[in-house]
C-alpha cells in the first residue's frame, strides 16, 4: 500500500496545462476540521482513502492544525517522514479529493495530475522533502503534468452533493459487503445487501428497502418501530432513527445522531439532531446541529431549474450544476421550531436562527436571527449553549476547539 501525505491547501504547478481558477471555498464544512475529516459519504474522506493508502501525515492550514492534531496520531504540518523500510517516494494527495482515483494510484515517479475545472493539484508522486515544501510554496515543479477532465475535488460547499452518490456507493461496497440475518418482525425488500451490526437494534415493523441499493446499520445504532429505510443508506454508530421515520436513499447518518421525519439524500457529520417531523433533503449538516420540530427545507426550485448559490455572504451568485440541492448547515447551528430553509441555503457555523422568516441565501457565521433582526452572536453566550449541548453527550470542548470557535466568531464581526 502506497504511503500518502494529505494536503489541505490550494496548490498548482509551475507550468500547469490549465489555468488556476482561484481558491477553494468550503466553509462551513471545513471551519472546524480538515477537508479529509469531512463526512463525504457514509465515511469521512480520510476513512475512505485509508483503505487505499497508508496516510503518513497531513499538511493543513495553521488555523485548524491544533484541532487536527487532537484527532489523529499521524504528524500534522511538522515531523512528516516515511518509515525506514518504505520506498523513497510518496504520494502527495489533495485532501479535497474524496475518492481514490486511478489516475492518482498509477502516477509515475515525479508526475502530477490537476483538475481541468480548477487547475488545482490533485496528486503528485514525489519525495518526502519536496512534499514538505508545499506547505510554504503552494506551487510544485513536477516532471510531467496530466489533466483530469471530470470533477474530482471539493471546491465549493455544494460539491458535497455533486460527489455524494459516488462516495456513498464506494463506502457501502465496503461496509455492507456481507449481508446479515434480518431480525424477527423486520421486513426486508430487494436484493441488495443489508448489513446490521450485531450490537445494533432494529425493532419489529421496520421496513428495510434494498431494491435500489445496500443498507448498513452500524454498531449500537437503533431503528425504532414503524420506520422505513431505503437504500443506499447508512446509519452510523450510536445513532437513532426515531419512530415512524422515512430515511430515503443516498443518506448517510454519522455517529451519535438522532433523526426523525423525512430525510433523503442527506449527510450528517455526527452528533447532530433532527429529532422531529419535517423534511430534510439533499443537505449536509455539521456537528452539534439541532433542528427544531417541524423544520423543513426545500431541495428543488419551483422552476425545476439549476440552483444558484453564493459560496460566501456577499459573493457573486454561482451556478452549482445541481437541480436538487438543499442546505449546507455548519457546526453548532440551532434552528427554532417550524423553521423554513430555502433551496441552496448555506448557514454559517454557530448560527442561532429564531426568526419566522425563512432561511435564505448564505448566512454569515455566528448570526443571531430573530424577528427583531440579525446581529452577531455574542461569543460568551454561544459557548454557554455549545457547552450545554456537548455535555448532553458527556463531551467537553477542548482548548483547541474553543480557540478555533473564538477566532471564527471574531472573523465574522
Image (cartoon, rainbow, N blue to C red):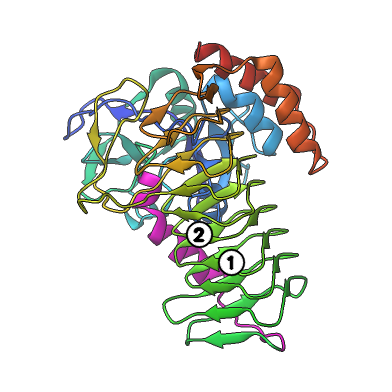
Q: Residues within 10 Å of mark 2 (few under 14, many from 20)?
A: many
In percent of the image, x 60 and y 49: which residue is there?
A: 293
What secondary structure is the stretch in magenta mostly built from?
helix
* Callout 1: SS: loop
Q: Residues within 10 Å of mark 1 (few under 14, many from 20)?
A: many
Viewer-closest of 150 and 193: 193
Viewer-closest of 382 and 58: 382
Image quadrant assignment for residue 101: bottom left
Viewer-closest of 355 and 411: 355
Report x, y in % for residue 47.
57, 52
Magenta region, residue range: 159-184
Who comes first in sequence, dot 1 or dot 2? 1
In percent of the image, x 52 and y 35: which residue is there?
A: 330
* Callout 2: SS: strand
Report x, y in % for residue 155.
34, 37
Which residue, given by chain and number where applicable, does mark 1 sit on? Answer: 245
Extreme-right residue of the structure:
394
Viewer-closest of 51 and 289: 289
Q: Relative to 149, is 165 on the left or the right?
A: right
Which residue, given by chain and number where applicable, does mark 2 sit on? Answer: 263
Q: Which mark is residue 57?
A: none
Image quadrant assignment for residue 66: top right
In percent of the image, x 81 and y 37: which residue is there?
A: 391
Tell me whether the residue at label 1 lies in contact with that at label 2, contact meaning CB atoms closer than 8 angstroms: yes
In percent of the image, x 48 and y 82: which residue is there?
A: 192
**Residue 299 shown in magenta:** no
Q: How far apart are the alpha carbons under marks 1 and 2?
A: 8 Å
**Residue 172 shown in magenta:** yes
Report x, y in % for residue 335.
57, 37
Report x, y in % for residue 32.
58, 31
Residue 91 in view here: no
Amino acid at each position: 500500500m502506497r504511503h500518502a501525505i494529505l494536503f489541505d491547501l490550494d496548490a498548482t504547478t509551475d507550468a500547469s496545462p490549465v489555468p488556476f481558477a482561484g481558491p477553494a471555498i468550503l466553509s462551513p464544512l471545513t471551519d472546524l476540521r480538515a477537508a479529509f475529516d469531512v463526512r463525504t459519504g457514509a465515511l469521512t474522506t480520510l476513512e475512505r482513502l485509508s483503505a487505499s493508502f497508508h496516510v503518513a501525515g497531513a499538511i493543513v492550514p495553521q488555523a485548524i492544525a491544533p484541532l487536527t492534531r487532537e484527532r489523529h496520531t499521524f504528524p500534522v504540518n511538522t515531523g512528516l517522514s516515511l518509515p525506514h523500510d518504505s520506498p523513497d517516494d510518496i504520494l502527495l494527495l489533495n485532501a479535497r479529493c474524496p475518492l481514490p482515483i486511478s489516475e492518482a494510484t498509477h502516477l509515475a515517479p515525479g508526475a502530477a495530475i490537476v483538475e481541468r475545472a480548477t487547475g488545482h493539484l490533485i496528486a503528485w508522486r514525489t519525495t518526502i522533502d519536496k512534499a514538505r515544501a508545499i506547505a510554504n510554496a503552494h506551487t510544485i515543479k513536477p516532471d510531467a503534468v496530466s489533466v483530469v477532465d471530470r470533477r474530482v475535488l471539493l471546491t465549493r460547499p455544494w460539491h458535497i452533493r455533486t460527489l455524494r452518490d459516488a462516495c456513498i456507493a464506494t463506502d457501502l461496497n465496503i461496509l455492507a459487503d456481507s449481508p446479515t440475518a434480518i431480525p424477527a418482525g423486520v421486513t426486508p425488500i430487494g436484493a441488495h445487501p443489508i448489513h446490521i451490526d450485531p450490537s445494533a437494534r432494529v425493532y419489529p415493523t421496520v421496513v428495510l428497502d434494498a431494491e435500489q441499493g445496500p443498507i448498513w446499520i452500524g454498531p449500537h445504532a437503533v431503528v425504532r418501530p414503524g420506520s422505513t429505510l431505503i437504500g443506499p443508506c447508512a446509519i452510523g454508530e450510536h445513532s437513532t432513527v426515531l419512530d415512524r421515520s422515512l430515511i430515503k436513499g443516498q443518506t448517510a447518518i454519522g455517529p451519535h445522531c438522532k433523526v426523525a421525519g423525512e430525510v433523503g439524500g442527506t449527510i450528517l457529520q455526527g452528533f447532530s439532531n433532527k429529532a422531529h417531523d419535517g423534511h430534510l433533503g439533499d443537505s449536509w449538516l455539521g456537528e452539534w446541529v439541532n433542528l427544531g420540530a417541524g423544520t423543513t427545507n426545500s431541495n428543488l426550485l419551483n422552476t425545476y431549474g439549476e440552483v444558484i448559490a453564493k459560496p460566501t455572504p456577499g459573493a457573486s451568485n454561482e451556478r452549482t450544476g445541481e437541480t436538487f440541492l438543499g442546505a449546507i448547515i455548519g457546526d453548532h447551528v440551532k434552528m427554532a421550531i417550524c423553521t423554513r430553509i430555502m433551496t441552496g441555503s448555506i448557514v454559517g457555523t454557530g448560527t442561532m436562527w429564531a426568526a419566522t422568516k425563512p432561511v435564505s441565501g448564505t448566512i454569515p457565521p455566528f448570526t443571531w436571527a430573530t424577528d427583531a433582526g440579525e446581529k452577531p452572536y455574542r461569543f460568551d453566550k454561544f459557548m454557554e449553549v455549545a457547552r450545554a449541548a456537548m455535555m448532553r453527550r458527556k463531551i467537553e470542548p477542548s482548548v483547541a476547539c474553543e480557540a478555533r470557535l473564538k477566532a471564527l466568531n471574531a472573523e465574522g464581526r
